[in-house]
Image: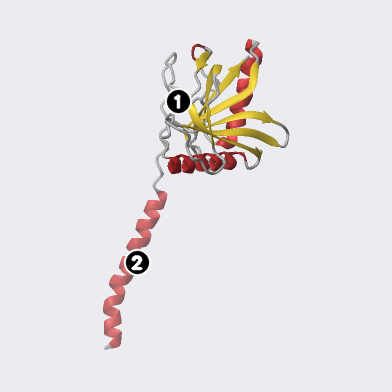
């Protein structure tokens, strides 16, 4: 009985195997059509070039670099200093202290926080953290070493830096080159107006106007 069962199944099975081998052999012998070569544009036709994103210029166009008179505004001031490594963190700390002082004194901040740089050397820099506020009606009670003063005033050229504070030296290098090229002499005061503050020195969201005061 077993021989009959295997005899019945064996013939069709061998036939199927033979058919499968023949099919594979036939497929292997079928040549693969060659790949279609890329289309060649006709002679004289212009070939479109890939779009290239230009990096933002460190120095804006000439027409936007005309000196203008910057007026002083009432502000809370905090004198401070920092080494280069901790620079932006120290600036942020100073601005937060001024905001806390303004809140406690009931003073309303106006526009953006700022920092005025008054002295630099190889080790670091001295600066004034600035928070413009509405002029108080009397003498406010201030904390955190804050003083009532004013933002710098005078004739200045405005530049803009967009990107991390870690990369702001590139913009200052471009500013220095521009001043040298135009024969302009700057004072020792540079004012940074933080349009968008970065969370830290590496935050690419930072946008700051840099006012260079001229002699």
Query: Quick one: 110 or 181, which is closer to the camera?
Result: 110
Mark 1 surroundings within 10 Å by alpha-carbon count, few (fewer than 14), some (14 through 19), many (20 or more) = few
Q: Nearer the viewer, mark 1 or mark 2?
A: 1
Residue 159 position, x and y percent, is 53, 22
* Residue picked out by circle 2: 17
Q: Residue at x 46, y 23 (%)?
A: 49
* Residue picked out by circle 1: 51
Query: Quick one: 199 or 15, which is closer to the camera?
Result: 199
**The C terminus: image quadrant:** top right
Q: Of helix, strand and loop, which one carries label 1?
A: loop
Residue placed furthest toward the bottom:
1
Q: Of helix, strand and loop, which one carries label 2?
A: helix
Image-quadrant location for residue 128: top right
Up the image or down, 31 lies above or below 209; here it is below
Q: Residue at x 60, y 21 (%)?
A: 175
Identify the image's colour scheme: rainbow, by chain, secondary structure or one colour.
secondary structure
Residue 204 position, x and y percent, is 50, 37
Image-quadrant location for residue 91: top right
């Amino acid at each position: 009985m077993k021989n009959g069962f295997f005899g019945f199944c064996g013939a069709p099975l061998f036939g199927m195997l033979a058919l499968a081998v023949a099919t594979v052999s036939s497929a292997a012998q079928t040549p693969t059509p060659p790949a279609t070569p890329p289309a060649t544009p006709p002679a004289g036709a212009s070939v479109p070039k890939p779009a290239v994103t230009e990096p933002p210029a460190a120095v804006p166009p000439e027409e936007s670099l005309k000196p203008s008179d910057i007026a002083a505004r009432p502000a809370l001031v905090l004198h401070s200093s920092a080494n280069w490594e901790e620079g932006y963190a120290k600036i942020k700390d100073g601005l937060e202290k001024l905001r806390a002082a303004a809140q406690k004194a009931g003073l309303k901040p106006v526009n953006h926080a700022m920092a005025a740089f008054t002295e630099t050397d190889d080790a670091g820099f001295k600066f004034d953290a600035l928070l413009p506020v509405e002029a108080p009606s009397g003498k406010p009670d201030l904390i955190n070493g804050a003083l009532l003063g004013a933002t710098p005033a005078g004739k200045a050229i405005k530049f803009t830096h967009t990107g991390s504070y870690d990369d702001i030296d590139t913009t200052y290098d471009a500013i220095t080159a521009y001043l040298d090229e135009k024969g302009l002499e700057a004072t020792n005061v540079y004012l940074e107006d933080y349009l968008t503050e970065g969370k830290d020195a590496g935050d690419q969201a930072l946008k700051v106007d840099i006012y260079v005061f001229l002699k």
